[in-house]
Image: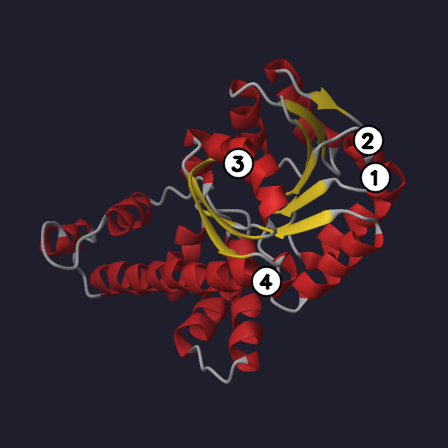
């Protein structure tokens, strides 16, 4: 049994922790708001008050946190509990420029750093069907294989050096597709309504044709029903548009659709809907 410290038990972290527990792994969970970690105790996790308590005795430290600054701050709080040889799997979406800082912190404390963000949202996380985009040394892969198998359907190893940020770079490219596609769907649904037609008619045009796909169906259904139960929050999507923009700028690439999507998300946040699913970008097409 691998002993895992799960730092960050939001929508994704909690689902991942439950799948680890179901697969016979030991989990010690910490979240800045302890109440969000407490339900995991029913599933068999030990819930603790500090990151240092969580990482003490862990074979693997997993961080599923909002951004690079948060991940670094939490790991600094955990420093007293770290020991040489622990594997740190950084699984949140951070900036390309954050990865070297995180890897340097790991090296200072003798930890083995693995850059391993996940592709997928709430439902795949709950089903243990995430795609892990990983970069790290061979020794760490042996330790992480049963861990990643418990939370994901596949692990794509990209590089032997976690500091290369290969996982993060591919994650940002992939999430840019989802973010941009969500905004495209939202504008089409909104335009159908704005032109005086039932938005459901758009589904009749697209379903079964060459432009149809499962993601279209999920997001279009949510927009037509005004059902924005959170799978991936607007606030997180907006953060990602900034990370994508910065990564693209560093590579000399323009990402106009991503930047426009970010503007839409910011309008939705200003409307007070930042914690809804990113399908709520539909709201950005209207004044209210």
What secondary structure is found at the residue carrying circle 3?
Answer: helix
In this rendering, which labeled residue sits more in front, label 4 or label 1? 1
Q: Which mark is residue 165?
A: 4
Which residue position holds label 3?
A: 145
Q: Residues within 10 Å of mark 2 (few under 14, many from 20)?
A: many
162, 79: nearer the viewer: 162
Q: CA distance from mark 3 to mark 2?
A: 21 Å
Residue 275 in the image: x percent, y percent? 55, 47
Q: Residue at x 57, y 42 (%)?
A: 141
Q: CA distance from mark 3 to mark 1?
A: 21 Å
Residue 65 in the image: x percent, y percent? 65, 47
In this rendering, which labeled residue sits more in front, label 3 or label 2? 3
Earlier residue among tags 3 and 2 = 2
The answer to whether mark 3 and mark 2 are in CB contact below 8 A is: no
Please indicate whether residue 94 sits to the left or right of residue 256 in the image: right
Residue 240 in the image: x percent, y percent? 54, 61
Outermost right residue: 80
Q: CA distance from mark 2 to mark 1?
A: 8 Å
Which residue position holds label 2?
A: 56
> Which corner quadrant holds the C terminus?
bottom left
Earlier residue among tags 3 and 1 = 1
Earlier residue among tags 2 and 1 = 2
Residue 169 in the image: x percent, y percent? 52, 64
The answer to whether mark 3 and mark 1 are in CB contact below 8 A is: no
Q: Residue at x 38, y 65 (%)?
A: 180
186, 288: nearer the viewer: 186
What secondary structure is found at the residue carrying circle 1?
Answer: loop
């Amino acid at each position: 049994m691998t002993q895992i410290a799960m730092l960050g038990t939001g929508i994704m972290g909690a689902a991942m922790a439950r799948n680890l527990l179901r697969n016979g792994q030991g989990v010690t969970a910490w979240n800045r708001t302890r109440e969000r970690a407490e339900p995991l105790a029913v599933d068999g996790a030990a819930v603790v008050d500090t990151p240092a308590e969580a990482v003490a005795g862990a074979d693997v430290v997993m961080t599923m946190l909002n951004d690079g600054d948060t991940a670094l701050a939490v790991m600094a709080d955990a420093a007293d509990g770290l020991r040489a040889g622990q594997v740190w799997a950084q699984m949140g979406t951070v900036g390309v420029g954050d990865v070297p800082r995180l890897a340097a912190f790991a090296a200072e404390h003798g930890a083995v750093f693995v850059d391993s963000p996940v592709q997928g949202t709430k439902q795949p996380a709950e089903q243990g069907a995430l795609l892990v985009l990983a970069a790290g040394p061979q020794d760490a892969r042996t330790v992480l294989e049963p861990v990643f198998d418990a939370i994901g359907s596949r692990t794509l190893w990209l590089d032997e050096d976690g500091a290369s940020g290969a996982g993060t770079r591919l994650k940002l490219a992939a999430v840019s597709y989802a973010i941009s596609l969500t905004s495209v769907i939202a504008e089409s649904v909104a335009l159908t309504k704005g032109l005086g037609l039932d938005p459901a008619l758009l589904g009749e045009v697209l379903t079964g044709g060459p432009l149809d796909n499962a993601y279209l169906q999920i997001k279009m259904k949510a927009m037509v029903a005004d059902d924005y139960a959170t799978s991936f929050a607007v606030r997180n999507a907006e953060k990602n548009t900034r990370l994508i923009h910065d990564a693209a700028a560093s590579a000399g690439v323009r990402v106009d659709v991503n930047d426009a999507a970010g503007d839409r998300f910011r309008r939705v946040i200003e409307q007070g809907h930042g914690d809804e699913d990113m399908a709520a970008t539909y709201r950005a097409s209207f004044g209210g």
